[in-house]
Structures are given as C-alpha cells and as structure tokens.
Image (cartoon, coloured by chain):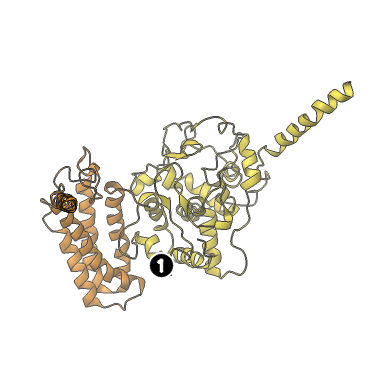
Chain colours: A orange, B yellow
Amino acid sequence: MKKLVTAAVIGLIASTGFATAQDAPFAREIKARQGIMVYRALQLGVLGAMAKGEMEYDAEKAQKAADALLASTQLDASMLWPAGSDNSANPASTALAAIWADGSDIGAKAGAMAEAAAAMQAAAGTGVEGLQGAMGAVGGACGGCHKAFRVPTN
Amino acid sequence: MGKILRMLLGWPLRGAAVGWVLTGPNPLPADTFAAITGDAARGETVFWAGGCAACHADEKAEGDAKLILAGGQRFPSPFGTFLAPNISSDPEAGIGNWTVLDLGNAMMRGVSPQGAHYYPVFPYASYAKATVQDVADLHAYLATLPADATPSQPHEVGFPFSIRRSLGGWKLLFFSDRWVIDGELTEAETRGRYLVEALGHCGECHTPRNALGGMETGRWLAGGPVPAGKGSFPNITPAKLDWSEADIVEYLTSGFTPEFDSAGGHMALVVENTAHLPAEDRAAIAAYLKHVPAAE
C-alpha cells in the first residue's frame, strides 16, 4: 500500500513537473527564437571558419551561408516576442524586460543586424577579404543586442 | 626620566615618520617627458588598447558617444563602490588642463596632480608598464576628444579605505613595473605582453586578487570571482582557454566565440576596444595568451 502511494505521489510529481515544463509561460516562443539563434550560428560557423582560415574559402558556400543569414533577419518576428516573455517570466529565456521598456531601441538594433547581414550577403561571395571585413559588423550587431537585452554572462 | 620618555615616545614616532615617508606619493621625475612629443594619431591606438572608454564612457554608449569620457560608471568592490571620474577634455570637470606629466603620474604612478594616491580600481598597477611615448601620444589624443561638463562623483568608500594615505602601503606591497612573464619571447609575444600586461590591463580582472586586493601574479590570468558581484572572470591561461589563436583573434575582432555566441558582460565593452586595434595587435595578444603558463 505504502509502495503504491509512493509510486502515485512520484507519478503525480513527475506529471505535474512535465505539465509545468510544457505550459511554462511563452515556452514555444522562447524555443522558436532560440532556434533562430542556433540557425544563425550554423551560417556564422561557415563564414567564421573561412574568415579564420580554418576552412578553405569557397565563394559558393560562403554566399549560401550569407544568403541564409540575411533571410533569417527578414522573417516575420511579430509572433516571437510577446510582451513580458522575458527571463523573469520563464528562466529558460535570457531575454531582459528592457526589450519592451519605454525608450527601448530594440527596433534600431534589429535594423542594425539586418544591415550587417545585408553587407555580409553582398561581400561574402567576392573573396575572403570581403568576408573578413564584413564579419566585424555582424559580430557588433549581435553583440549590440546581446549587451543591452540579454542576461549578462561573463 | 626625559631619556626614558624619549625612548618610549621616540621610536614609535620615528616609525610613524618612516611610515609617513614610505606611504607618500612617488611621482615621476619632472623631466620624464622633456624630450618627447605626443602624436594624437598614434594615441588613438593607445586609447583603444588601454580601454579608457570601457570605464569612462557611458556603459551603453555606441559609436562616437564612446568618445565622451564623462565618467559615472559604478564599480562595486569589497572596499566600497568606486565611480569612474570625468576624464574628458573639459578643463574644469575633466582633465583638459592636465599636463602630460600629470597624465604620466596618474597612469604610471597612481598619483593625482595634487599628489594624492588614486585607488587601484584605476588600473595604474598595469599602466605603470606603459612606455612614456605611449602616455604622451594618449595625452595628445585625449585633448582632441569632446569636453563634457558633468562633474565627477565621489567614491562611496567607507573607513578605513577612505584614508588615501593607506594606499601608499598598498603600493609598497603590490606595485611593480616588472613584467609578469619573463624570458625568451617572440616579437609577437613581446607585443602581446605589452598589450595584455600594460595597456590592456587584462590581469586586473582575469587574475585572482588576495584579501588586500593585490593581484596574485603567481596565478597570472587564472580567473577568479567577480568582486562584490555574481559570477566569475574566466581563466584565460592555456589550462582552461583551449581556443586556437584564430579563435582568440576572431573573439577580439567581432566578439564571436567559437560557438558563435557573442561576448557578454564587461567583456563586450572590451571587445569594442580591441576591435579598433590593428589586426596584428590582436594576433599578438593571442600569441601571448598561448605562451603564458597554464594555471588552474
């Protein structure tokens, strides 16, 4: 009997835990935007490896990666960032509430990212120097947003 | 009786007198910059390598706003909270009326134009190793930056750390203008050492500190906890930093880690400085970091 109760209690805790993880606030939105970040890291992995000289420069591959990176900045993000979907609502996110605060320049920062990705898209296929030259601005745009709107990390 | 009194009183007094002399400021010789002319264009590189803007500009500043060195950033520590002063070219609120010798004494000796000790939150323990030419070049460059009339705010430091004279003792214990990494170095490693140990003052955060706030140079760049804050500064010796030299260069250029995340925290500000350096300087830093002894 005691065993049965224990099992039932464990089962209950486990199922509630599971339900909480599923129903955590903004879980889908957070997963979706983190997916976009991982997608960008995939393109940047190719561009960065060529910029560092770890991978032989290949104009076609570089162009493909830069095209995809630019496309990722042109997605409709209107469903991704509902107000309040920040780190305090769900610790799975590292987004700060400052994104939605008065005077937030999130729009300008997103614009800077699109601009840097467009410059990369124009440069990536022209040669390794062009690619290297565009890398800094992309990094600056990523970092600009992360610095202002992400839970600080060291 | 008088003799005994003298004996009783004399020695402590003499000890105090010696202590007073030893803890006094030790400025540079007055003719240090006599034969040197500053070059503002070269001073810009010194400015970015020295990371002045990371602390003296607004934390959120971007682009040209990083050149407004009005101060105000807060730095909590176990000794109190320090506030970055205005070092803009304003003659009243900033340092616009400083001579090159004033700047030299501040950076290389930690001494103000009035002869007071600065707190070592201002990384003169690193800048002490800078060349006088670089200080002169920086002085020329700082004069070209905008003036800002925002007054400097006082540090929020309690007794006994509020007694600046005690910093003379701190300097006796921890102040040194000798290189941490000695011995045979390549040309790139030598330049990297200068950038890391002197101007870049990387050790100020990445080297653990003892109870009195001195850098434990025996564990050079081995990381440590953030003072009076959360998290820790990472170990950047080969014991923990397994990035390739190309990875380090990329990080100091674009802020991208090998996983293509971007630099965070105060390091994001550091990368905004190193991004302005010539590419070979970033490669020199990477070469030096690969050369330092691994420390757990």
Residue drawn at point x = 30 percent, y = 63 percent: B260
Chain bearing tag 1 is B
Image quadrant in which you'd find residue B71: top left
Q: Is residue B89 visible?
A: no
> Given the image, on which type of amino acid does mark 1 rest?
Trp
Of B175 and B228, the residue lying toward us = B228
Residue sticking out furthest to the top: B1
Residue drawn at point x = 22 percent, y = 39 percent: A103
Whole-percent x, y for residue B34 in the image: 65, 48
Helix, strand or loop at label 1? It is loop
Q: Determine whether, in the image, residue A96 is placed left or right of residue B29.
A: left
**Depicted B190 relative to depicted B64: above or below:** below
In which quadrant of the rendered image does the N terminus of chain B lie? top right
Residue drawn at point x = 46 percent, y = 60 percent: B236
Q: Is residue B91 visible?
A: yes
Of B189 and B238, the residue lying toward us = B238
Whole-percent x, y for residue B161 in the image: 56, 34
Whole-percent x, y for residue B157 in the image: 50, 32
Residue drawn at point x = 26 percent, y = 78 percent: A58
Whole-percent x, y for residue B92 in the image: 49, 32
Of B176 and A67, the residue lying toward us = B176
**Depicted B255 relative to depicted B127: above or below:** below
Task: Look at mark 1 in the image and give the residue it sits on.
Answer: B243
